[in-house]
Image: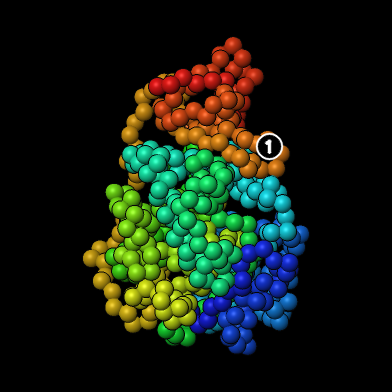
């Protein structure tokens, strides 16, 4: 049974005095659709209990939008919640449980302080790593810094790439009436912005936002087909993974989606990729097989991600500029693709080809990721000659018995309860990675040897939780 998109709508994203339910109603109203045939409501919110103090949210929302009595359920997978609720609503329609389902995703965040929001979001991090003061920006920064190191991209060149991602996002945000940030930025403005977690600056990080998205999925044939969906998970602890510079959870989700669709990445006309942090756009393009590592710098230097480029990506402004109400973003990506594919975007920024779109959504720090592929019904594709297969990453063995710095960041906006700035490092010895706080005073560089004073190590090393406080370090 085919599953199709019948309607889609967004609320305005950004800081709002409106209550959560009003943002949801706004998204529904912007669908301009009849709800009389809705048989079920699937709702995605990451953490309404902490953000708004409202529990039993599925019943509450269904009642407040005039659908009391209709079956409803809430879904949550951290920041990929919007994609997850779409995925499960799709499964229900595909299985024949319902003919027409209303899919909603939202979050209300801006009424809380930044440290409070940071603390709530950081609760999705593995508990022992969270005890170090790690937050999403700090972990993303360490992944990004190691990515540049492994791909032989200098700090200055990597900054140029991230700046281009941010400039593109803000350019398209300025053209999106739903976006939180609606002004272009320059390279100079980007460079002058403060660091949040080195090397990530303010303009590398998506904002705290309020917003909602709505979609109707149906078994009735429409112009837009859900061609493929995929989900992948990974270990919650970053330091327990085989690789931190690529996200295998996205790769597995993408392969599942492509195999379901029956066609590969060369068919994708444009994409909406989870860019809660600018380097995640880069990694997302690699993990969905839309770009090769050797192509990254050229891709951004030549502006190939713009609407008239080789592969338009995040021409909605993305999470970075449209805003990132965590529970809503995954579904908002799908709504934006629907709007582009159905001619609801300005012609001057609509890509030449809009037959096939891909969205990628990250949950937590890439622990629960989704890929969705949409296709214009009847569009021609180049089929896969054989199913795609996931290939385990090739890991070079490390024999060094001493601890070295694997990655590091200085965090200027730590979660509530931690002082700023907070230096965090990932240590490597043989095949083991450990997240730690550094109190050396100077942020160590990748490859530096770490010195631990054995005389007082017992009071500084908590082996149970793999938390270190470092006394100093030596250069390679």
- Residue plotted at (44% across, 55% down): 165
Hey, which residue is sitting farthest top in the picture? 455
Residue 354 to residue 145: above or below:
below
Residue 49 to residue 70: above or below:
above
The x, y position of residue 386, in whole percent, is 25, 63
Q: Is residue 176 visible?
A: yes
For disc 1, the marked residue is 418
- Foreground of the two, 80 or 253: 80
- Residue plotted at (40% across, 48% down): 160
Hey, which residue is sitting farthest right in the picture? 53
The x, y position of residue 135, in whole percent, is 59, 43
Q: Is residue 371 visible?
A: no
Hey, which residue is sitting farthest front in the picture? 188
- Foreground of the two, 105 or 339: 339
The x, y position of residue 58, in whole percent, is 68, 69
- Residue plotted at (47% across, 61% down): 169
Describe the element under mark 1 as helix, strand or loop. Answer: loop
Left-right relation of 324 to 111: left
The x, y position of residue 172, in whole percent, is 47, 66
- Residue plotted at (47% across, 64% down): 171
């Amino acid at each position: 049974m085919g599953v199709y998109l019948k309607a889609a709508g967004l609320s305005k994203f950004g800081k709002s005095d409106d209550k959560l339910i009003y943002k949801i109603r706004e998204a529904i109203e912007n669908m301009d659709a009849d709800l009389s045939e809705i048989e079920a409501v699937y709702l995605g919110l990451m953490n309404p209990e902490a953000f708004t103090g409202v529990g039993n949210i599925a019943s509450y929302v269904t009642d407040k939008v005039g659908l009391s009595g209709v079956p409803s359920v809430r879904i949550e997978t951290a920041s990929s919640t919007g994609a997850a609720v779409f995925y499960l609503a799709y499964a229900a329609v595909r299985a024949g449980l319902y003919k027409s389902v209303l899919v909603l995703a939202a979050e209300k965040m801006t009424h809380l302080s930044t440290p409070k929001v940071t603390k709530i979001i950081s609760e999705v991090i593995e508990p022992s790593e969270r005890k170090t003061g790690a937050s999403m920006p700090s972990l993303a920064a360490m992944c990004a810094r190691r990515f540049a190191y492994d791909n032989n991209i200098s700090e200055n060149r990597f900054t140029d790439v991230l700046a281009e991602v941010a400039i593109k996002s803000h350019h398209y945000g300025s053209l999106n009436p739903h976006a939180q940030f609606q002004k272009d930025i320059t390279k100079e403005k980007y460079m002058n912005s403060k660091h949040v977690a080195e090397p990530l600056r303010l303009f590398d990080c998506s904002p705290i936002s309020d917003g909602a998205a709505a979609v109707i999925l149906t078994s009735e044939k429409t112009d837009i087909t859900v061609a493929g969906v995929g989900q992948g998970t990974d270990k919650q602890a970053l330091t327990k993974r085989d690789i931190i510079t690529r996200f295998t959870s996205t790769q597995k989700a993408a392969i599942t989606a492509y195999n379901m669709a029956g066609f590969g990445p060369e068919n994708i006309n444009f994409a909406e990729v989870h860019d809660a942090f600018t380097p995640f756009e880069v990694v997302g393009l690699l993990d969905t097989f839309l770009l090769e590592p050797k192509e990254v710098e050229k891709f951004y230097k030549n502006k190939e991600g713009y609407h008239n480029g080789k592969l338009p990506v995040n021409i909605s402004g993305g999470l970075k500029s449209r805003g990132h109400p965590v529970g809503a973003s995954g579904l908002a990506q799908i709504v934006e693709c629907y709007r582009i594919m159905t001619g609801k975007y300005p012609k001057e920024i609509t890509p030449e080809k809009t037959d096939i779109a891909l969205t990628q959504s990250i949950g937590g720090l890439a622990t629960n990721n989704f890929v969705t592929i949409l296709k214009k019904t009847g569009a021609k594709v180049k089929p896969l000659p054989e199913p795609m297969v996931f290939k385990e990453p090739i890991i070079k063995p490390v024999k060094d018995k001493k601890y070295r710095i694997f990655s590091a960041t200085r965090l200027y906006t730590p979660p509530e309860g931690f002082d700023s700035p907070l230096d965090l490092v990932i240590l490597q010895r043989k095949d083991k990675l450990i997240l730690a706080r550094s109190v050396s005073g100077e942020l160590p560089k990748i490859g530096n040897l770490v010195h631990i004073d054995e005389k007082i190590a017992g009071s500084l090393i908590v082996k149970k939780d793999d938390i270190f406080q470092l006394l100093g370090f030596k250069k390679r």
